């Protein structure tokens, strides 16, 4: 995990999603249909967010995970109170949203994450 003065410079598209809470179009992200073994880290600060073992195919159009790396992903209720945003606990970069009760996995949790918010580090 990098210190603030070492964070990666973001492209305009990355800034739109990570800093301005945007969303990439469904089924366009590089990690949607990606299943290598390793760790997904924050694109901005490289904090570890998700292990590949927690990734699953939800069919929603974005990478889905049913577990996070402890203390590295923060849940924040959206202003409208309808959804729960997920952000990097280190840099507060927008990752996506988390949903409960959909029964996709035994953990009954789906982190719906923008590919552009992450980088992948292969084991």
Image: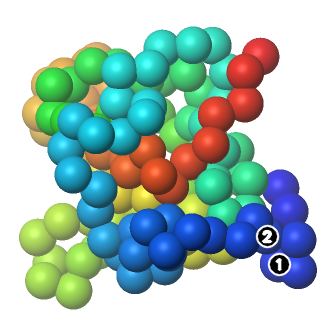
Q: Quadrant of residue 112?
A: top left
Q: Is residue 60 visible?
A: yes
Q: Specify the farthest residue to the front.
A: 12
The number of discs equals 2
Query: Residue drawn 52% across and 40% down?
Result: 68
Query: Residue drawn 16% across and 25% down?
Result: 59
Query: Residue drawn 13% across and 83% down?
Result: 80
Q: Mark 1 highlights which residue?
A: 4
Judging depth in this view, the residue of 83 and 13 nearest the camera is: 13
Q: Mark 2 highlights which residue?
A: 7
Q: Quadrant of residue 77?
A: bottom left
State the quadrant of the C terminus. top right
Query: Residue drawn 28% across and 40% down?
Result: 28
Name the element at disc 1. helix
Q: Relative to residue 28, is residue 36 drawn left or right?
A: right
Q: Specify the farthest residue to the bottom.
A: 79
Q: Is residue 70 visible?
A: no
Q: Quadrant of residue 1?
A: bottom right
Q: Relative to residue 78, is residue 4 drawn left or right?
A: right
Dot 1 crowding, Cα within 10 Å, few <14, some 14–19, many 20+ = few
Judging depth in this view, the residue of 85 and 46 nearest the camera is: 46
Asked if the residue at tag 1 contacts the one at tag 2, i.e. Cβ–Cβ closer than 8 Å, the answer is: yes
Judging depth in this view, the residue of 19 and 96 nearest the camera is: 19
Q: Position of residue 91 (x, y in %)?
A: 66, 73
114 w.r.t. 63: above or below: below
The alpha-carbon separation of the residues under discs 2 and 1 comes to 5 Å
Q: Relative to residue 37, is residue 111 drawn left or right?
A: left
Name the element at disc 2. loop
Q: Position of residue 45 (x, y in %)?
A: 73, 62
């Amino acid at each position: 995990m990098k210190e603030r003065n070492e964070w990666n410079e973001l492209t305009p598209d990355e800034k739109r999603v990570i800093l301005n809470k945007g969303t990439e179009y469904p089924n366009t992200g590089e990690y949607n249909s990606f299943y290598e073994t390793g760790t997904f880290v924050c694109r901005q600060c490289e904090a570890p967010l998700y292990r590949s073992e927690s990734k699953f195919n939800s069919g929603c159009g974005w990478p889905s995970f049913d577990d996070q790396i402890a203390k590295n992903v923060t849940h924040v209720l959206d202003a409208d109170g309808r959804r729960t945003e997920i952000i990097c606990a280190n840099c507060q970069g927008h990752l996506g949203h988390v949903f409960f009760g959909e029964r996709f996995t035994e953990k009954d949790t789906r982190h719906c994450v923008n590919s552009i918010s992450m980088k992948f580090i292969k084991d």
